[in-house]
Image (spheres, rainbow, N blue to C red):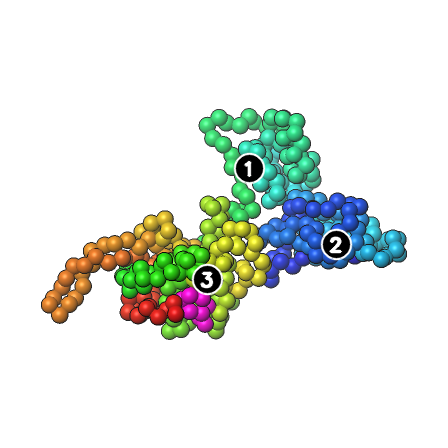
Amino acid sequence: MMDIVMPQLGETVAEGTVTVWHKKPGDRVEANELLFEVSTDKVDTEIPAPATGTLVEVIVQEGETVEVGAQLGILQVEGEQAGTAPAATIAPTRPAAVRPGTPTTDPSAPPPPLSPVVSRLLAEHGLSPDDVAGTGTGGRIKRKDVLDHVATGGQGARSGAAPASGDHRVVPFNTARKRTADHMVRSKATSPHVLQAVEVDFHRIADVRAVHAADWKAREGFALTYLPFIARAVCQAIGDFPNVNASIDKESLLVWQEIHLAIAVDLDFDGLVAPVIRGAQKKTVADLARSIADLASKARNKSLSPDDFSGGTYTISNSGVFGTMITAPIINQPQIAILSTDGIKKRPVVIETDDGDDIVVRPVGILAQSFDHRAIDGAYSAAFLKRIKDIIEETDWGSALD
């Protein structure tokens, strides 16, 4: 017999929720065939079977959350004789340590937490948690409770629950939204945020994009945006101001030698993820463009691996696609700074010429950085931003895509 356990899906992940079992007890499964799915605070992942055999028992049900390493089920490996394993392996004396809900039905106690799969089902069917009677520990709502409620067409099944108000609808947070919310609250509580911004003239990049956009799209299959150029400028500027590429460890600053650049990706307005481009300082603009497009596609297709999220040292958040003027981004812990790239628009700009000042139309945008004031001061952050600005405005980007 082989124990199926909750895998370690990232170095900081402590627990996971079984969202779907793709096999039931008695089913045969091939090695590397999809067996179950797990949701953590970092990623949703499909888990394959570790060996060929028969699923003997499911210990942790769909919607239950357990610690990493907890036993989820039992697999009888092909070729083994049933009953040859110790009885404790076949039938554990107690189930895996499921995260407890509310231990009593005291009406003054807070409701038991919802698992990601239950939250998703409630949202899909337009239900509030108050509509469904939970049969789990402490009244916790399980996946089966929601499905049974939908199947019977029941309304407001919880005894004593107040009827839903007609002036609003309840939209439960899905897993991605919960992850985003928890991380944002923790970041604001951890770091004293300070915002600084610079105005940047992007005409040199705009000229290169105008020349290469069509050929690039035909060759690569995606649009050439400003973002990879900005990312390249950020990496170059970090070389001069390395302390922004850091984390805080108690009373010390850990300054990272490599730049692992996290790119915030919106999940269709249902939360954010920030997958990581490793060794970004070694990449060209073209390399960065391909990496950004690849990670964004994986994020939206939910095919990112846990490794894609780990180890980021600096983050860029791109709100510019929506035409924003300035954004105060929240630091991606445990990093100490994050850059927002906002909308780039044509504006009149005063430039100095040999004949005096002149007014020209240029593509202009704001780059805004939130930084942790424990780690660096305003002068250091401002100098870093100015360095990014100078690189963008003064570099001859014509050969960047060669």
The answer to whether residue 90 is visible is yes
If you read the primary sequence from the N terminus, does the residue marked by circle 2 or circle 1 appear first?
2
Our reading of the magenta stretch's main secondary structure is helix
Residue at 65% in and 29% down:
151
Please identify, in this view, whether the residue under mark 2 or under mark 1 is nearer the observer: 2
Q: Which residue is at a point 50% across and 54% down the rendered structure image?
A: 297
Name the residue carrying label 3. 290
Within the image, what quadrant is residue 330 found in?
Answer: bottom left
In percent of width and height, residue 157 lies at 63, 28
Q: Is residue 30 magenta?
A: no
- Image: 353 above or below 33: below
> For the residues marked 2 and 1, what is the alpha-carbon distance in whole angstroms?
34 Å
Which marked residue is nearer to the observer: mark 3 or mark 1? 3
Q: Which residue is mark 2?
A: 30
Secondary structure type for disc 2: loop
Task: Identify residue type, mark 3.
Answer: Arg
- Which residue is located at x 88 percent, y 53 percent? 83
Sequence-wise, the earlier of marks 3 and 1 is 1
Badges 3 and 1: C-beta atoms under 8 Å apart? no
Q: Would you place residue 148 above or below residue 350 in this image?
A: above
Residue closer to the observer: 327 or 102: 327
- CA distance for labels 2 and 3: 35 Å
Location of residue 284 in the rendering, given as x and y in whole percent from the top left corner:
42, 69
Q: Mark 1 — residue?
A: 123
In the figure, is residue 103 to the left or right of 42?
right
Disc 3 element: helix
Q: Is residue 191 among the parts visible in the rendering? A: no
Q: Amino acid at mark 2?
A: Glu
Q: Residue reaching furthest left?
A: 355
Task: State which region is magenta.
Answer: 280-287
Q: Earlier in the sequence, mark 2 or mark 3?
A: 2
